[in-house]
Amino acid sequence: MADRYSHRERVQMIMAGEKPDRFAASAWRHFYHKESTAEGLAEAMLDFQKRFDWDFMKINPRASYHAEDWGNKYDWSNDEFKKHRNIHFAVNSTTDWDTIDVLPAGTPVLTEHLKAIEIIKKSSDPELPLLMTVFNPLGIARYLVGGIDKILEYINSEPQRVSTALENITVTFERYVTEIRNAGADGIFFATLEWGSADLLTYDQYEKFGRRYDLRILNATGNNSLNILHVCGSNNYLKQLSDYPVKLFNWDACDPTNVNIERCFEFLENKTIIGGLDHKGWLWHGKPSEIAVEMGKIKEKMAGKRFIFGPGCSIDAKIPFENLDAVRRNL
């Protein structure tokens, strides 16, 4: 049976608490061998969308794009399944934090990714919602220094330097998310990375080094922006972040340390959740017939709710396409 509604109409109906013709879904992954150029990234995203006809596109750029214009350098992978290799970090000493200034307009890598959005927008169905991936400032700062342990050390030993850098990163991306919208994206997929979690920071620390900057970037996208908040990791702060000004929430609800999709509506009332696909479990390792069974259980539980099928994070590049076909077929 042909779809009755467009992708945009379907997503809007779900967000309004209405029942469309079928459940909606999306999935996203890296294409490491193509994402080192705007043209390659756009081609990969468009091909993936053409193959599966998802209800929204989460543009999945190379994660490093946030940090490259500040000086991070990489050896690009030509292997679809192998990540890029970092060969230089922008922050290698305490005083390097002082070099993390507000980036001027037109910096090469951020401009490159605006071009990718423009290409995708031009070649996509106008009724397909497009969301560009943006990391939170604390996550970008971690990319600049490299390891998690290193930035935690700086947070404890040099909190003012880190805060100044976070301010400059925030101003840069407050401006950039406006450019993202102008390039054709409907909004952003805003990821806390590992920081929205009790595994790394207390919530008081997250309020100081995370939340205050997060909210500024989200607010800069505009009142009509279609934004998703992605809260990464285990033991996450989903409940504490449930008042963020977004309409859609995504997290790993299959992780037993996090709130599951049945309980989340206790505090995500009138919000739309994206989840249910166990990207580390049956979505990756199950057979298509098993995926159909698991999705059937979720559809029964989520009937009539503001719910969209999606993974709890980027899916592994090696997940078989036949498993994603099973997702699309069983909506």
Image (tube, rainbow, N blue to C red):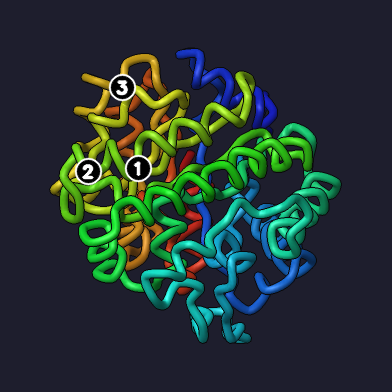
Residue 324 image position (x, y, % from top left)? 49, 57
Indicate the amino acid at tag 2: Gln
Residue 55 visible in this rendered orientation of the protein: no
Pick the front one: 74 or 126: 74
Residue 12 image position (x, y, % from top left)? 58, 21
The secondary element bearing badge 1 is classed as: helix
The secondary element bearing badge 2 is classed as: helix
Pick the front one: 157 or 219: 157
The residue carrying mark 2 is: 205
Where is 270 relative to 38, above or below? above
Q: Earlier in the sequence, mark 1 or mark 3?
A: 1
The residue carrying mark 1 is: 210
Query: On the rendered image, what quadrant is the N terminus found in?
Result: top right
Q: Are marks 1 and 3 in contact (CB under 8 Å)?
A: no
Q: Are marks 1 and 2 in contact (CB under 8 Å)?
A: yes
Q: In percent of the image, x 30 and y 62: which residue is there?
A: 280
Q: For the residues marked 3 and 2, what is the alpha-carbon distance in whole angstroms?
A: 23 Å
Q: For the residues marked 1 and 3, what is the alpha-carbon distance in whole angstroms?
A: 21 Å
Q: Which mark is residue 268?
A: 3
